[in-house]
Image (cartoon, grey):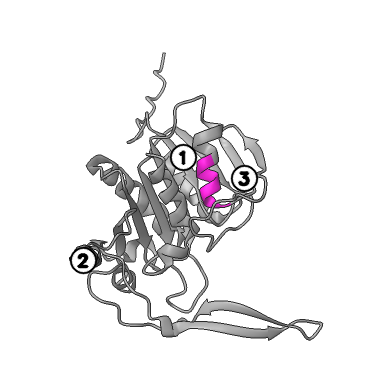
Amino acid sequence: MAKSPRKKKLPLDGMRILLSNDDGIHAPGLKVLEKIAKSLSSDVWVVAPESEQSGAGHSLTLSDPLRLRKISSKKYAVAGTPTDCVLMAIKHIMINDNKPDLVLSGVNRGQNVADDVTYSGTIAAAMEGTVLGVPSIALSQAYGFDGKQNVHWSTAEAHAPAIIEKLVGIGWQSDVLMNVNFPDVPPHLVGGIDVTRQGKRDQSLIKIEERVDGRANPYYWTGFQRIPSNPSKGTDLRSIYDRRISITPLHLDLTHGAARKKLDAAFSAK
């Protein structure tokens, strides 16, 4: 009698992985993230916003009720922000079970680099996971650098599993989250991996576009002009420009050490 094929052991099997995002429960990037997570572990949970929450930052819903919808086993949608989703997952949905060992947020449609990290709901979901004591990684797929709107989801899908596995193996401090950005190229054209620092966007590229609706009332869109800048070497922006994967450790403590020392000296002086 023929033996049944042995089931392949997954790299992080035994780990419980929680997925969330800011693009919403139906986002293509979340489907990609599910594939990535399920290539690493068989215990994958999804709790994501009912609708798109891009730019929500680390906001928390306090003045409205949160609505929870169960889609299937281990998969839920929350009518709230990415922060709400991770909080609901850990403090309610999974409260009578073991909490996750790892939070993955994304894969975001568009990079989250430089100043983006303070606006990003993708980063916020990973931030909330970190606040609640769970190692967390944000993943984003850059697009539009070639003037086209197609997103190379296959790049994140091809490269993320090995990066996540290596990061988990190395480990990191409890007040740090990992921000991973994939460049706007097909998988085989990725030039390598850089460990980077947070860059600074050219704020002159911000634009406010005024339009007029059908009743002659003005309304506005906020956005960035897609004009290449020249970011500093070693930054997340530079790596994405150079078609390389960027990994940036972000610190929850926003205190500026040098400024604090200067103020302490001034205010403690007699």
Q: CA distance from mark 3 to mark 1?
A: 14 Å
Q: Amino acid at mark 3?
A: Val
In three-dimensional space, the C-alpha distance between marks 2 and 1, rounded to whole angstroms, equals 37 Å
N-terminal of the pair, mark 2 or mark 1, is: 1
Q: Is residue 229 above or below residue 27?
A: below
Dot 3 or dot 1, earlier in sequence: 1
- Residue 34 in view here: no
Q: Position of residue 255 (x, y in %)?
A: 30, 59
Residue of label 3: 78
Of helix, strand and loop, which one carries label 2?
helix
Q: Amino acid at mark 2?
A: Ala
Q: Which residue is mark 2?
A: 258
The numbered mark at residue 114 is none
Asked if marks 2 and 1 touch (Cβ < 8 Å), the reply is no
User: Disc 1 marks which residue?
Assistant: 18
Q: Position of residue 75 (x, y in %)?
A: 58, 38
Does 86 appear in magenta?
A: yes
